[in-house]
Amino acid sequence: MMKKIIPVLIILVVLIVTAAIAIGIKHTKTVDWEESFDEKSNKPYGVSVLYKELPNLFKDHKVRTVYHQPASYLSANSEDGYGEHVAEGSFIIIGNSDYLEDDSIDQLLNFVNAGNTLFISDYYFPQKFHDTLDVSVNYIENEKDSISHLSLKHLNIDDIMLDKNASDQYFSEFDSLNHTVLGHSKIDYKHVNFLQVHFGEGNVFLHLEPKVFTNYHLLKEDRYKYVESVLSYLPDNDIYFDSYSKIQTGYDGDVNKESNLGWFLEQLSFKWAWYTAIIFGILFMIFNAKRRQRIIKIINPLQNTTVAFVKTVSNLYFDTKDHKNLVDKKIKYFLEKIRHDLNLNTDILDEAFIEKLASKSGKKKEDIKKLVNYINLMKSKKEFFEENLIKLNRHIEAFYKK
């Protein structure tokens, strides 16, 4: 057996290795342009570069990553909470803010009201932010070259280019008396895309171009200057960086961090080595189990002796010629079934009984009358012959068939 298996395994190994080499030669790695805004992602639209630079931008202050809904995190890390510290500083959210639930928005605004700062950069915000902070967002398409030009009003940032940008978001409505304009997107004329909103004792910063914080733009030309300038509006304090809205999996605030194996599987050589090892492991278990498996004893199922029993009992009655006993039993079982199935009293088999049985069974009255009359005849007889038993059986079978 093993001599037959070994050539098959050798051929399978050669095919897998050949396929891996061919795919490795022809494989062209494609760029993933998904806007994840994930602080662990090194892809173009991840924010790992910004995340790594935050300790340098806010020196001597802690940068904490929040893996839970802000409601649960800020509640736990409050004066009356059970956290290890009291949350104070700036809470930063880059993209995907639509994952925030209403109670988290309330908790963030309470956080700001107590004298802290909230910074959100997204294309649009949850409706509760729009309603509470009295802002509306609209957009205009970049029809020519998908390039935007960004500027900051009070800083020396006048024209930072943002390519691969299909549209410019801007604040179409806001409270010009109480909100401070900090930045614009420039097309044919300026659109406000960066606001400072005073809320209680603190401030909310609303920014509408999250793409500028991604790896692709931070590492291109001098675009990092724009990001540095935007974040310079935040007070010099501890930073709370949102990760929940990037990897959130439910409404309970729990998160599942991405497996470290995912990075290795992106490497073509390791991926094929891993899959090859799994395939050979499965083959080894299959063939090894087949070679070592103990012989299973065949246990024949128990025979159904019901038919044999019936034949034996029938032969007993037939040989003894006890036709009376069989007639009595057939009548008794038939009437018992009538009582059980049709709920009829079978003590008196008269004309009234025939009417009821015909009505409930749906049979013809003439046929029912023949059957009942014959039963009454059999009950009155003392001597029986084989023909009586056969005729009674035909009447009963006819009742069930029609």
Image (spheres, rainbow, N blue to C red):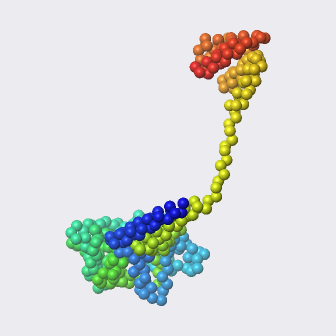
Residue located 71% across and 20% down the image: 330
Q: Quadrant of residue 401?
A: top right
Query: Does the image show residue 228?
Result: yes
Q: Nearer the viewer, residue 153 or 2?
A: 2
Tell me the quadrant of the picture where the C terminus can be found: top right
Which image quarter: residue 265?
Answer: bottom left
Q: Can you give x and y, in whole percent of width and height, for residue 261 in the image?
A: 48, 73
**Placement of the N terminus among the 4 image quadrants:** bottom right
| Residue at 76 percent of width and 17 percent of height | 321
Against 136, is 54 above or below?
Answer: below
Along the viewing direction, whichever of 33 and 68 lies nearer the viewer: 33
**How many dots with numbers?**
0
Q: Is residue 352 visible?
A: no
The image position of residue 140, as x and y in percent, is 27, 66
Q: In the visual, does 379 lie left or right of 134? A: right
Left or right of 105 on screen, residue 122: left
Q: Residue at x 72, y 10 (%)?
A: 377
Residue 121: % across, % down? 38, 73
362 relative position to 350: left or right: left
In which quarter of the view is residue 173 placed?
bottom left
Residue 82 is situated, as x and y percent measured from the top left of the image, at: 60, 75
| Extreme residue in the bottom direction | 60
Q: Residue at x 50, y 62 (%)?
A: 5
